[in-house]
Image (cartoon, helix red, strand yellow):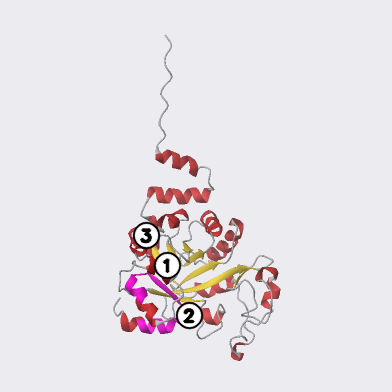
Amino acid sequence: MATSPPAPQRTTHYEHRLRRALFASATTIALVLVFVLNPDAAFVYATNMFGALRAPGDAAFIAAHRGDRASFPENTIPALQAALDGDFDFVETDVQLTADGVAVLMHDETIDRTTNGTGPVGFLTLEQVKALDAGSYYAADFAGLQVPTLDEFLAVLASAGGKKAMVELKGIWTEEQVRSVTALVYARGVQSRVIFESFEYETLEALLAGAPLIPRMLIQRDLPRDPVPLLERFGAIAVLTRPASVERHPEVVDLLHEAGLGIVLYTLNKKGRWSEALDLGVDGIITDTPSSLDDWLAKNAPGT
């Protein structure tokens, strides 16, 4: 007598996720397994980088924007060293690639504003970038300062105790380009003290694939009402956003913290803004005036 074929087995949600993961790169598979096996992994990593997530009134950590640019030319070694020598948790800087693929510290797409040269960073070789004067625009005392490479900055960071860095990858990066800067981070032994950040979704996807074990932060000018799914999409530990975005939807702070994710605001330079940020319970503040913010916090959030 003929027998009926066995009923097809229903595929569980977990099996669907696992099958999809098998088509990803080996590093991405490893990251997926971390989160499947340990759902609290993102929370642990966020708190390792930022300390405890803040409640309203708690002192936020300070990130010096492009170094201590209130006293030195931005994104130069003196500015970054001063920030690392100060009583601040983080220094924040920007990275772009030269025409020959070397990562250098430069915020603008062109070199015009902060050097004596002209043109896009990506059109110049490292030799051409190194020939520029990156200090005279700020003051004559800084004439002759060079544009640093990322590796030169990481060497300074490596000798700066437990200080940490937020490194924004400007523009769209490929996975191969991401791996080139990740190699520098690991070579200097600072992989536990660096957060990569980007506005670009393509770059965040490249970071997820090419540098899955180095934390990521999404930069988003305007947040949705619930930003948690967006951060989870990129495996990000935090979002960096404008104060206006949080003021429109103050509930996002609680939503992020409930998910074990952080929130950092840029770029706050006035006391009124600092007070508003503390009232919201954000975790960090990026500022051009880190020394002034440090003094203000000592007076207005003592013991936190």
Horizontal side of residue 91 vs 140, given as left or right: left
Q: Nearer the viewer, residue 87 or 278?
A: 278
Residue bearing the label numbered 2: 288
Disc 1 element? helix
Residue bearing the label numbered 3: 44
Q: Amino acid at mark 1?
A: Ser
Tell me the mark number nearer the camera, choosing from 3 and 2: 2
Q: Residue at x 47, y 63 (%)?
A: 217
C-beta proximity under 8 Å, tags 3 and 1 = no
In the image, which residues are magenta?
Answer: 276-296
Quarter of the view holding residue 274: bottom left
Disc 3 element? helix
Q: CA distance from mark 2 to mark 1?
A: 20 Å
Tell me the mark number nearer the camera, choosing from 3 and 1: 1
Q: Residues within 10 Å of mark 1 (few under 14, many from 20)?
A: some
Q: Residue furthest front?
A: 248
Q: Residue at x 36, y 83 (%)?
A: 296
* Label of residue 245 in the image: 1
| Numbered marks: total | 3
